[in-house]
Image (cartoon, coloured by chain):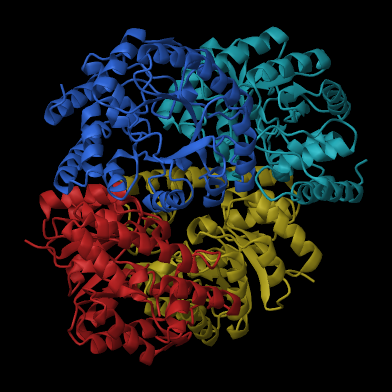
Chain colours: A yellow, B red, C blue, D cyan
């Protein structure tokens, strides 16, 4: 049985024109660009989508508009990570109504739950979800990792269909992959950090949820395909280009927000969408924007 | 000029009968118990109040009901900490409408903001708040501390009226106190961890936001008064009792949630309110409940 | 039964003229200054003494010379913290030969031991020590804290005589103090961070191992005495001065080494000893030296 | 220009019969087993070798004996990581005298140096070393990572010949590899965690410093060769077996020491050497030993 999600599923940035207003025209251009680039799905309301920084009203508007714009061409996955299970369930139900295909959750991120508590949390959440669920391991921001014990247990839930791992810990990824191979060959194992996409796919991973695919979807799609086909030379070459993008576009700012700022700024320069950032962040100012423009030129993205 | 808030301002636990339903009768008993115990204010929707785990609907209901029940007898402070500034502002406005006296915010807690970003965040938030703001330093859960630079800047905002420090880092507290003494003698410096309440007040702190005051308000109020009066013998004796409460009631469970679970369980045993916990936590089971009952007996709380 | 060590026991900086050479003349001036300032003991080879950065040869030379210079006027405590228990024991034995009074150890600091392993470590170490042992809790640098379980167990060893806590976590300190009051009233509970010396002594702590006492011993001794005597007004005043010293002298550099650099630089300006720093650190350059000189003037230290 | 070190360079465990006595017969069997298994070098006194837990006398004895036993068949690299630069230099000089081929250092690990300080440290160390130096990035135990800036600078030192990265952060590894490709094609980029050996070599890494190669050298050597040759099918199969070894042998104990304990216990069961562990650790007891024996049988190692 094949995993449902394979290939590149970009964690879509959220185009904004203000702190509570969606850049709908930008969203349309972005969605079309992604689909034309060959992505296998769109993941809205993830970390790259600044989900926790958006109002609940806007989150719903984004899901609705994205589903309308995608219009069934590819699957739409919706991040429902929240500190309140009531809000997670409500967003999952709304998303099903808008036509989304799956939901994605990491651990509740204010109180760090113990692993048995995390298991109970998933146990309580799953039956109330109207859509399949993908787990999202993001310990640097949620404080806890889904332990082997929790993932093993989740593999017994038919409705849970995979794991997106953004830990950057490839040893963890390999162990979860090993586990899935034995128990849930239909699970999708997707990796977060794009710098290690090539490696995971070469060893049997199913694809990536990579921020850079917002900017240059075909690069990531082609890298995925080369690695899946075992074309090592092409994989090395494309992986090197992903690394160059990462080394330039994501390193203009100083703080942890530099990646999202860099992506939004680059998309703005390319005329795709506005680069407004939700608080506590702000868009790059002119000096940084010029650096991003220079990097785009060097990378041949235009 | 005197600080507005002095004394004990308990971070009220949120009495629940279910995941999205308030225990209104329990809330009434709890509010009366606190006021009779001599507290100087009630802080709802803090960490001890499980705020991030509650639905937005319930948060509003809690603020409304608490303001009604308190009915002006003491001030009500409302936690508006959120990952979305839009939701923080909305809750502040609603709270003003219900009659709350002040709002309290820590740093947005998903993305860890850099200090300049944190300053901009406060700068953006303050003008939109209809009520005075108290900062709430809680780095273990929000990932960032309000740095000296940010606090110094906040001291220039008249609307910011104090700092509640739950870092447990008394050196930090002392430095902020030193700063306030020079620049904002009207600021309230309140301490979180009750185990160090005595020490901070002896050296000039203004009081505590201590979870244990939910259970035994007069103990904390009397400790505050003894320390403020410089009665060292009484301070040592009452501080020892606070430590005994902490060492017993907060150490029955294993995970970080043990404190809130212990408080809710104890209040349930005393017949004050239900001990339902919002996900990802659950109330203590029978074995732990018996331990808490035993501890209450030993502490002479009944 | 009274605790053996009470009052101020400075963690002496190590005066160096080069990477493997002691500033013997400076050491003599420093030792005399400390004793004249009224300290209750001298603790060599602690963190402030840059112990782990020194060669083993120099460590022995320092212990020998210090014992000679002190010449029985006050007790000498020697830090034997090491990653190798063989070296810890060897240094303890050498120290006994030179006439030291006690040894001090924190946890081995390369591999973070589990708590049961830490207990076994102490269990293995204690019988081989020719001198009484004080535990030194320094989790920020050793990665592990002595847990309540380990400390409780250590209280059953007659040869273990106290705990120096540099965690900065006053809640931890209070709990250990509570434990000692019940089980080992002869234990010395000394606090590391000087910013909280006043608070701990007011509530029953026995003194401090405070870096600033290298520079201004009488200030710390007088603060200790005021707090022990319950003179709140004087305690507040002297505690404020300690804070001013900390806020100025320790904040000239940027990195974690700023405290030791500041102390050595100040002592050099005062003509006490050389300010050479062992690698990986280096002494302050001219610009920072001028700032320290300015701070000394403002603090009235000369 | 080819990197000097390619292939598998095991971080050799240190066979001990007691806390300060080498198991010389075991060392001889182990060295022969490694060389017969096809390793490209032996790295003594690394983390897996419990270096920081050994006395300085024993460290020298180990280097001397290993060099004698290896007798020029393959290179010997010596870990000189220390908190004291004087001791690092002394050990490097002794190692050159015994005939070692290179030295390896991570950051001094008590005081966490700032990056400029770390650069100065390397700058001060390199001229005094009689042998080529490999950097060893081990942030989980040394508290600091060699930043891009420091590594770039080190690339300008001819005497620095490569980097062993045990961070587990493949993104970091890829970036350093990218840097080396541009500036120092002769640098050896070796990876620590064996679970990601396959991935790094497929993308152009030069080999691994993998603990498991103590136990089953040919497995790691064959995996390295398969990945280097681009034989994806064989790489996946052998990588799966490495993962199985890791998942079983390294997970019998609970604490961070479980990996070294598991390796030593397995080697003891195989009759290679004693499993004595230096403090603060101790060898596995009978129950765990039986589990390791069972795992060895399942893995077909005998």
Can the viewer see residue C136?
no
Question: Residue C220 or A75: which is nearer the viewer?
Answer: C220
Q: Where A153 sits versus D200, above or below?
A: below
- Residue B12 x/y as whole percent: 34, 76
Count of numbered circles in the view: 0
Instruction: Specify the quadrant of the image occupied by residue A147.
Output: bottom right
Residue that appears at 81% across and 40% down? D265
Lateral position of residue A86 relative to residue A219, left or right:
left
Q: Where C129 sits versus D226, above or below?
A: above
Q: Where C59 sits versus D15, above or below?
A: above
Can the viewer see residue C156?
yes
- Residue B244 x/y as whole percent: 42, 63
Residue that appears at 23% across and 85% down? B70
Q: Quadrant of the N terminus of chain C?
A: top left
- Residue A62 x/y as whole percent: 43, 76
Lateral position of residue C253 relative to residue A238, left or right:
left
> Looking at this rendering, what residue extends furthest in the left direction?
B1
- Residue D186 x/y as whole percent: 64, 23
Lateral position of residue C290 relative to residue A294, left or right:
left
Residue that appears at 38% across and 69% down? B47
Question: Residue B5 or A248: which is nearer the viewer?
Answer: B5
């Amino acid at each position: 049985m094949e995993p449902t999600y394979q290939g590149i599923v970009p964690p879509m940035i959220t185009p904004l024109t203000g702190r509570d207003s969606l850049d709908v025209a930008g969203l349309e251009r972005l969605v079309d660009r992604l689909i034309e680039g060959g992505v296998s799905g769109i993941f809205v309301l993830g970390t790259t989508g600044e989900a926790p920084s958006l109002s609940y009203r806007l989150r719903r508007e984004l899901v609705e508009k994205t589903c309308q714009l995608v219009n069934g061409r590819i699957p739409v996955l919706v991040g429902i990570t929240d500190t309140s299970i009531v809000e997670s369930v409500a967003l999952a139900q709304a998303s099903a109504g808008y036509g989304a295909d799956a939901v994605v959750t990491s651990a509740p991120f204010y109180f760090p739950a113990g692993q048995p508590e995390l298991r109970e949390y998933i146990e309580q959440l799953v039956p109330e979800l109207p859509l399949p669920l993908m787990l999202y391991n993001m310990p640097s921001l949620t404080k806890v990792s889904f332990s082997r014990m929790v993932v093993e247990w989740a593999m017994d839930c038919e409705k849970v269909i995979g794991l997106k791992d953004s830990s950057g810990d490839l040893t963890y990824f390999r162990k979860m992959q090993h586990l899935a191979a034995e128990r849930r060959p239909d699970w999708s194992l997707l990796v977060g950090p794009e710098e290690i996409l090539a490696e995971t796919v070469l060893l049997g991973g199913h694809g990536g949820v990579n921020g850079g695919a917002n900017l240059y979807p075909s690069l990531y799609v082609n890298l995925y395909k080369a690695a899946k086909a075992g074309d090592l030379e092409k994989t090395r070459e494309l992986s090197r280009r992903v690394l160059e993008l990462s080394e330039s576009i994501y390193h203009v700012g100083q703080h942890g927000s530099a990646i999202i700022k860099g992506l939004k700024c680059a998309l703005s320069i390319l005329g795709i969408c506005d680069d407004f950032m939700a608080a506590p962040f702000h868009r790059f100012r002119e000096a940084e924007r010029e650096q991003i423009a220079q990097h785009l030129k060097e990378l041949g993205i235009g």
